[in-house]
Structure formats: C-alpha cells, structure tokens
C-alpha cells in the first residue's frame, strides 16, 4: 500500500458511520482468553468531542474502505498563574508630629494570583485498522489534525493514553514531537447493589449553576487545565449538578446564602465536586470473562441485594453494556476536606445507583491530597494515565509562563469531563 493512496478527509456521519463503527469493533478485539473492554458510542462516533467549543473528526480511506480515524477538539484552559497588581484600594493612616495628628490617604495594591490562559487542542480516538498499521496512516492522521489546530490558533496539543501502550507512546513521542507531561490517576469505584452511608456529620448542598461557577472561578481558576468556559460545562445537559459538602450545622440547603457570602464566611473545612453523565454518551462492556468469573460476580450481587445492611462490596454486571458517572471539579479546603470528599463520593455513588450506572470514575493529579478521600478499586483503576504534550505555536501566551511543556506539575489538575 502506498501512503499517497490514503485520503484523509472530514468525517461524514451519513456516509461513514457504519464503516467507522466496524473499524472501532476490529480495533477493540482483545486477545483470546483475556478480558477486554468494549465501547459502544451509541451510534454517534463524535459523541466524545461534540460538547467541546470546537471539534473535528477525520477519517483515512483507501477507495471505499475506511482504515483509520482520529478526533480532536479545541478549548481554552489555564496553563499557569501570575500575580495581578491591578486591585487597588484606599485606606487612612494616622501620623503624629509635634502633638498634631493628621490623616493621610494611602493607596495600597493587593496581590492576587490570576490564571494565565492558553488555547489547547486535545487528540483522542485515534484508530487504525490492524491490517494497515505500521504504514504511516496514524502519523498522517495526526499531522492532518495538527494542521487544523494550527489554522485555529492553537498553542499546545496534548493526548492521553495508557502508560503501557507502547505503540501509542512511541507514535506521539518519537514521531510526532510530543513529550511526556503529566501522569494523573484514573480512580474507578463500582456501584454496589446497596446504598452507601453518608456521614451524618456532613451536609451536602446542591448548588445552582451560577453559584457553582462563582465558586469554581474564585477558588480553582488557577488550577492547571481549568477550562475558561466552565459555565458551558456546568450548564450542559450532561452535567447532573455541583454538590458542596460542609460540616453539619454550618449551612443547609434552606439556609444557603449564596456563593459570595459563603466565600467570605466559609467553614474551616469544605469540599465540592460535579457529576457528568457519561451513561448517555457511551457505554462499556467487559468481554472474555469465564463462566466462573461471571458466576462469582453474580453471587456477590445476590448477597448484596439480599443483605444490604451488611454493606457488602459487590461486582456489578460488567458483562453487559453499562454506563458510568464521571466526577469532575473535585476541590476543597481545610483539615477535614478529605472527609468531606469521602462524603461527596458516597453521595455520588448513590446518585449513580439511582441512574443505573455500573461504576463511578474520576481523574486526579497523582499529587492531589484529596485523592485519599476517593474510594476506588485498584483492579479497576489506572494509577498512571499518561498525558503527552506538544507546543504548536511559536509565541507563548504569557512571558511569565514560558514554555508550558517544560513546567513542573502542580498539586492539582482539572480534568474536563468532555474529554473523558
């Protein structure tokens, strides 16, 4: 096959959907006798990018045969922070000289960290038919997608893959000029047949989108990868709400004073998170399990349903299509913030149970201290998801940041639910 015979063009839903789905199925066939995770995009190949501000899907074809595809989206996110000296206020000072007092008006400048934004692109869903791999098709798709990024003024492009996906890592780092950048952790917890107990010492309040946006921008706008269009995410139909955990007796849903008052009168410890409904976007299914493993999982669910008061952990039915909720925007402050996060995760578990989900997932920085409050099963989670990044623009968005690709990781990271 000559690479010149491969045509890369924009995806056409009416013309290409069935052929794209066939390539997806071929690429997801796992080794015989081993467990494999299959994804059903519910008839919408661009479902994982369509909620972004700008997106594109490309296909590679030879004649009438589609042999590969790639998705990409563009957004504006925080790449760092800088001190702002624009906030000036006036106050009076009293001076005494020879027993005479006088008041002088002095202007002081408050220093505050503000976010530095940059335009980034995210690459996902790169697939090449097994019979056409190692021929340069993947590289051609990436280059064509990067060309679209450049046409739209993107400064950085990044992608995510499993740390042990050697072929993907080599393609991007060896052939496409990307560098290893961040290694966040994907934490996954099953949804049990019983409801999880939430600590009575914690009160959980559902915030309206205006208060949620205000709280996120005031406290987390300088977090790496924080999306400037957070309001669009919070108002999206897939966002099921933002939930705030506070100590019992501090605030209640009925006495909630609004985010402005809360920010100036916050309790010593609090936490918040938002919930994204991935179940209506795509479903997952585990295939290749033996009858013994299926029977064992079925037995755990039976015991859990029969004896819910024992709070026994059970294995959901992963062997048929299941959906999940994604927890995003996790944050908090105070010495008991971890406990607050744990209560919020319990609440989120019960919400996922009501919606018929199989798991609850989130992704956080490996340095995130709040991760200790996030329940998860190690066997379902990924401790080292790998993000690789590349600078596309010649000019940097801000001189105080420089080359973002060379910056050290922060404590926290904001994972956009539209990218998961």
Image: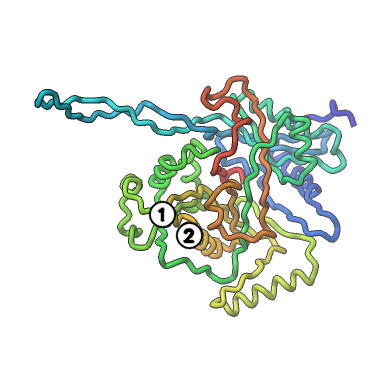
> Above or below — where is 288 with respect to 403?
below
Name the image quarter holding residue 90: top left
Kindly identify which numbered label has been placed on residue 269: 1
**Extreme-bottom residue of the structure:** 306
Is residue 213 visible in the rendered image? The answer is: yes
Q: Nearer the viewer, residue 246 or 143?
A: 246
Which residue does the numbered mark 2 point to in the structure image?
339
Query: Regarding mark 2 in the picture, which secondary structure is present there?
Result: helix
- Gap between marks 1 and 2 measured at Cα: 9 Å
Would you say 338 lies left or right of 30 here? left
Q: Residue at horizontal 17%, vertical 27%?
A: 95
Marks 1 and 2 close (CB-CB < 8 Å): yes
Q: Position of residue 115 (x, y in %)?
A: 47, 33
**Extreme-top residue of the structure:** 394
**Total labels drawn:** 2
Query: Regarding mark 1 in the picture, which secondary structure is present there?
Result: loop
Q: Residues within 10 Å of mark 1 (few under 14, many from 20)?
A: some
Q: Quadrant of the N terminus?
A: top right
Would you say 55 lies left or right of 370 here? right
Q: Position of residue 308 (x, y in %)?
A: 56, 76
């Amino acid at each position: 096959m000559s690479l010149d015979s491969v045509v890369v063009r924009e995806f056409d839903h009416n013309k290409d959907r069935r052929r794209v789905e066939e390539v997806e199925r071929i690429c997801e066939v796992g080794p015989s006798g081993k467990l494999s995770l299959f994804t059903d995009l519910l008839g919408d190949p661009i479902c994982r990018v369509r909620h972004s501000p700008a997106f594109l899907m490309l296909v590679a074809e030879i004649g009438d045969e589609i042999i590969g595809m790639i998705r990409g989206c563009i957004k504006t996110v925080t790449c760092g922070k800088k001190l702002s000296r624009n906030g000036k206020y006036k106050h009076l000072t009293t001076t005494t000289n020879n027993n005479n007092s006088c008041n002088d008006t002095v202007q002081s400048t408050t220093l505050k960290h503000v976010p530095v934004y940059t335009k980034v692109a995210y690459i996902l869903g790169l697939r090449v038919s097994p019979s056409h791999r190692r021929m340069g098709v993947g590289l051609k798709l990436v280059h064509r997608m990067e060309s679209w990024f450049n046409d739209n003024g993107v400064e950085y492009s990044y992608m995510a893959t499993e740390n042990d996906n050697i072929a993907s890592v080599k393609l991007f780092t060896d052939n496409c000029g990307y560098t290893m950048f961040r290694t966040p952790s994907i934490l996954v917890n099953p949804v049990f047949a019983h409801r999880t107990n939430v600590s009575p010492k914690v009160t959980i309040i559902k915030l309206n989108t205006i208060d949620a946006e205000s709280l996120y921008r005031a406290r987390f706008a300088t977090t790496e990868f924080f999306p400037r269009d957070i309001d669009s995410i919070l108002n999206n139909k897939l966002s099921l709400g933002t939930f705030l955990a506070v100590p019992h007796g501090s605030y209640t849903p009925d006495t909630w004073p609004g985010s402005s008052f809360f920010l100036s009168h916050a309790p010593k410890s609090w936490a918040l998170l938002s919930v994204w409904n991935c179940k209506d976007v795509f479903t997952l299914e585990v295939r290749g399990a033996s009858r013994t493993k299926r029977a064992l999982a079925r037995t755990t669910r039976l015991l859990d349903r029969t004896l819910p008061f024992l709070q026994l952990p059970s294995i959901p039915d992963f062997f048929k299509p299941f959906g999940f909720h994604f927890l995003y925007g996790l944050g908090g402050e105070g010495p008991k913030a971890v406990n607050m996060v744990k209560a919020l995760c319990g609440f989120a578990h019960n919400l996922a149970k009501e919606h018929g989900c199989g798991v609850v997932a989130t992704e956080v920085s490996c340095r995130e201290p709040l991760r200790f409050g996030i329940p998860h099963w190690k066997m379902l989670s990924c401790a080292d998801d790998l993000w690789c990044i590349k600078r596309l623009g010649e000019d940097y968005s801000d001189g105080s940041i420089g080359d973002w690709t060379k910056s050290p990781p922060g404590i926290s990271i904001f994972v956009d639910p539209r990218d998961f």
